[in-house]
Amino acid sequence: MAFECLKVERRGPVGWLINNRPDRLNAMNARMRDELADAWMQLDTDAEVRVIVHTGEGRAFQTGVDVAEIASDGVGMERYRRSVEDFDLHFTAWHQEVWKPVITAVNGVCAGGGFHWVADADIVICASDAEFFDPHVSVGQVVSIEAIGLMRKMPVEAVMRMALVGRHERMPAERAYELGMVSEVVDPPERLRERAQELGETIARNSPAAMAATKRALWGALELGLTDACRAGAAELVSMWGHPDQVEGPRAFAEKREPRWAPPT
Amino acid sequence: MSYRTLQVERRGTVGWLVFDRPDRGNAMDATMLAELEDAWRELDADPTVRAIVHTGNGPAFQTGLDVEQLAGDPDALREQSRRTRRAELRLTAWHNQVWKPVIAAVNGTCAGGGLHFVADADIVIAAAGAAFLDPHVSLGQVTAYEAVALVRKSPMEPIVRLALAGRQERIGAERARQLGILSEVVGEERLRERAQEVGEMIARNSPAALAATKRALWGALEVGLTEACRRGASELVALWGHADQTEGPVAWSQGREPRWQENARGI
């Protein structure tokens, strides 16, 4: 499949999804939106890919919907009305029900709709020169889905502040780290991709089946009250009992070798 | 409207709601309980007010119910008990469904029921000497509302510890910032100036978009993630076609401040 607005690559067990409209700060036009849906499915169905890294080309990671396209073609946001009203979205790994681990590596600016991929990733790391802000309310737009996802995952006050302050303030990488929005700040920033690849390879050493069930349990927990979430999580747990990885894992550990996991189904 | 236990003021686009019982740690007596509801309504209905700052006079921010005074006013105490039982409190901006941005500027001690105003604010900043404690269990009282909201908004262990340690322990302003309970600590003498600045910064954004954003984000605390996104999407789409969505980008491209639609109650 040929992509215009993305690069999709494999490096060992790690699949790479790279936003590739650097001259537009990787803003998402309609084409990129469609390509993202395909790229997630392509990487998810590739058995060689165990972990996915998502990053951007240029000085921005992602800056949300392409406002220039919205303003210029006479269709505006209306093109998205039906899919947003129905919450029928397909541009993040969570939307696409990708159960492989997803690492977002934030290079540079992450603004507005760019938070979708911070909220919907499993692991987030960033370059030391990354900056986060949400200009929606400064151009008369509502902040909603991205921030709702973030609020489940980090202290709420910080999310509210970004949402209400708009473009008049930016959060530096260090504060994002303090708040637990990201788990690692990579310095110098040029080392970001190298570090993301290392982290991806580290995670790829774990059982794909166990990681998928773990993801389902933890993301599912954001849907329910605590006791129901534990109940649903228990079902994921038990579903793995008897899986060959549960024999192979301890055996490889005892024999001091890398496990040979069952291919993901 | 005149108040006995609060100061309600305007400074440009920012409305101020100041607790004013400094000799009583700004504790809420019967009068303040009634006046809070009026003050939120007054500021919310004033179209010149785009953001609201909330702080206290004297060494304390807010120390909860003035139990002593309420004991001498059985009617007020009964009414407050009834509202507490039915979850019909009218103390905070959230209780009163204020959809304008609310900044709590914690000037000093915030104890017990004072935590309502931290839990229910959108943005919280504090003076370096501010401290948070919850003496409820030290007085044989249960902590519920305040901590229930705070555990949705910040790491849980520190909140549960605060609730169970009672008056024996407090969280300082800097620790509260690390935990993400608040976003900024400033010198005491600069607190109000900084709160006004943050208020003015927010007031530059579209009032209609701010109100819809608040509804989406606070509403998200009520339901599971997918359902919250679904409801949030309705708030998002509801504003499509609003005049502010044309004015915002035009003003940006012309390098000037936007002229937003007036919006009395942020609806």
Image (cartoon, rainbow, N blue to C red):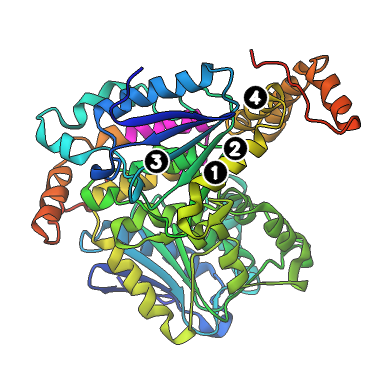
Q: Chain of mark 1?
A: A
User: Tag 4: Cα neighbours inside 10 Å, few (<14), some, or many (≥20)?
Assistant: some
Task: Give the spatial CA distance, label 1 vs label 2.
Answer: 6 Å
Q: Is residue B139 left or right of residue B184?
A: right
Residue receiving disc 3: B216
Quarter of the image with the C terminus of chain B in it: top left
Answer few, some or many: residues within 10 Å of disc 2's Cα (few below 14, many 20 plus, some between 14 and 19).
many
Amino acid marked by disc 1 = Ala
* Picture layout, residue A192 above or below residue B68: above
- The mark closer to the camera, 3 or 4, is 4
Q: Residues within 10 Å of mark 1 (few under 14, many from 20)?
A: many
- The chain containing the residue under callout 2 comes to A
Asked whether B165 or A29 is in front, the reply is A29
Residue B229 drawn at (x, y percent): 43, 32
Q: Is residue A239 above or below residue B68?
A: above
Do dots 1 and 4 share one subunit? yes
Q: Secondary structure at mark 3?
A: helix
- Residue A246: x, y in percent? 82, 21
Q: CA distance from mark 4 to mark 2?
A: 15 Å
The chain holding disc 4 is A
Residue B267 in magenta stretch = no
Residue at 70% across, 32% down: A205
Specify the segment rendered in magenta.
B218-235
Q: Are marks 1 and 2 on the same chain?
A: yes
Circle 4: residue type: Ala
Mark 2 lies on residue = A200
Q: Position of residue A48 (x, y in %)?
A: 58, 21
Tell me the number on the disc at residue A196.
Answer: 1
